[in-house]
Amino acid sequence: MALTLALLLAVHLLAASFWLGGMAFMLWIAPPALAARLPPEQQGPLRLALLGRFLAAVWIAMPLTLASGYALFALTGAAVRASPGLHAMAGLGTLMGAVFAGLYFGVFRPLRAAAAIKVPIRLRGEGTYAAVTTLLAMTHSEFPDLAVVRLSVRGEPNSPTSSASISVDFEWFAESAEASGAASKKNPG
């Protein structure tokens, strides 16, 4: 029994130290270091990559911390005779686990999806004014992941058969490299 308790305590302390130390690193060490060495446009992708790797590790550390803590509570009878401080620690650990899950699913996953790769596309051509407007309407309805960055149409809108020229700069919101890598691992074909 003593060896089991010692192993549980070691797992609990190591996993909790990793979890809390990682949070301290992500909050107080990484941001100023990135800000001091990288331009703002390069900080976001690196912060997102660091956060993704850290959160993946927390999915291991958090359950180990909570499970070993609950096991220690149960095996030592501390749930009945423990000090208010131990009960507070158990409650805080449970709360931190719930907050982590909420942040992961409510903030990180949508943030990662929003950080999709933006591919610039330039389209230029000529045709009737009616054909140009039809092309724009079709592009809008068929490709919802395209955003118009710049649009220039020259022609006479009151004369649908007159010639018109178009120049459009789009941004295509492609899947992020991380997401596409995960998708290709799931569907290798």
Image (spheres, rainbow, N blue to C red):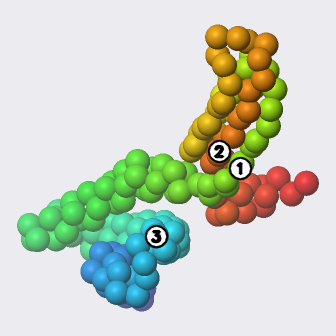
Residue at screen point 51% across, 69% down: 45
Q: Which residue is mark 3?
A: 41
> What whole-number distance in Å separates the C-alpha atoms at marks 1 and 3?
21 Å
User: Which comes sooner in the sequence, label 1 or label 2?
Assistant: 1
Front in this rendered view, residue 29 or 130: 130
Dot 1: element: strand
Q: Amino acid at mark 3?
A: Glu
Left or right: where 179 falls relative to 11:
right
Q: Which residue is mark 2?
A: 170
Left or right: where 180 falls relative to 173:
right
Residue at screen point 40% across, 88% down: 37
Above or below, 79 against 186 in this view is below
Residue at screen point 56% across, 44% down: 149
- Image location (x, y in percent) of residue 47: 45, 72
Badge 3 crowding class, 10 Å Cα cut-off, few under 14, some 14 to 19, many 20 or more, is few
- The numbered mark at residue 121 is 1
- Image location (x, y in percent) of residue 128: 79, 21
Q: Quadrant of the N terminus?
A: bottom left
Mark 1 vs mark 3: give the one in front.
1
> What whole-number distance in Å separates the C-alpha atoms at marks 1 and 2?
5 Å
User: Which comes sooner in the sequence, label 3 or label 2?
Assistant: 3
